[in-house]
Amino acid sequence: MADSAQEAVDKLRHHWVLDPWYSGMTAEDHMRTQLYKDKAARKAARRESAARNLKLSEFLRELGLRVEVRAPAEGAEFARVAQLTMRTNQMNSTMQRFASEQDLESWLGPGYQRAGANNRWIRAGWCADRIGAYGMVACALCRLSPLSTVCVIYV
């Protein structure tokens, strides 16, 4: 139960069912039904592999997991990065959130399209396997400090 009206609003804003009314839908939002079906198919494949006495490592090899890491394109992919920062608490020790693509662009600063501009950048990760695509599942918001590269947020 929420302690205040603001907490109640915040909880509602973070519930995926209300995404269409709160923000634009991402590609992953549109794929949600298929993602659930794929998850069920993976569970069935795992049970079948266990019946064949396959080790987990062998099952994962059979899945043919593929990972792509690159800079997200502006627009819809930036919207998904923002969504991940709003929904994921693990590995985000800063608790910094970005509600929109515009918030990300503001964090990146002017000229972010040029490599190395403002010493800030974003990388995102997409996964797929023989059953289907997971979509964008991770992102890292990084900045260069005088002595090192700092991963500000990783989800």
Image (cartoon, rainbow, N blue to C red):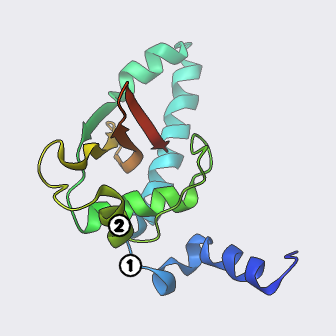
Q: Residue 79 carries which label?
A: 2
Residue projecting furthest to the left: 114
> Neighbour class for label 2 at 10 Å: few (<14), some, many (≥20)?
many
Separation of residues labelled 2 and 1 (CA atoms): 8 Å
Can see residue 27?
no
- Relative placement, left or right, of 126 versus 46 is left
Q: Is residue 17 above or below residue 154?
A: below
Q: Looking at the image, which is closer to me, 12 or 60?
A: 12
Which amino acid type is shown beneath numbered disc 1? Gly
Where residue 110 sits in the image (x, y, percent)? 21, 62
Q: Residue at x 37, y 26 (%)?
A: 148
Where residue 35 sits in the image (x, y, percent)? 44, 55
Q: Looking at the image, which is closer to me, 25 or 105?
A: 105
Q: Dot 2 lies on which element?
A: helix
Q: Residue at x 28, y 46 (%)?
A: 121
Disc 2, disc 1: CB below 8 Å?
yes
- Relative placement, left or right, of 106 versus 10 is left
Where residue 34 sits in the image (x, y, percent)? 41, 60
Going from the N terminus, do you reach mark 2 or mark 1 first?
1
Which amino acid type is shown beneath numbered disc 2? Ala
Q: Dot 1 lies on which element?
A: loop
Where residue 40 sits in the image (x, y, percent)? 53, 48
Q: In which quarter of the image is residue 104?
A: bottom left
Can see residue 12?
yes
Q: Looking at the image, which is closer to me, 88 or 95?
A: 95
Q: Which residue is drawn at 27% across and 67% down?
A: 76
- Relative placement, left or right, of 117 versus 77 is left
Q: Residue at x 35, y 66 (%)?
A: 79
> Neighbour class for label 1 at 10 Å: few (<14), some, many (≥20)?
some
Q: Mark 1 points at which residue?
A: 24
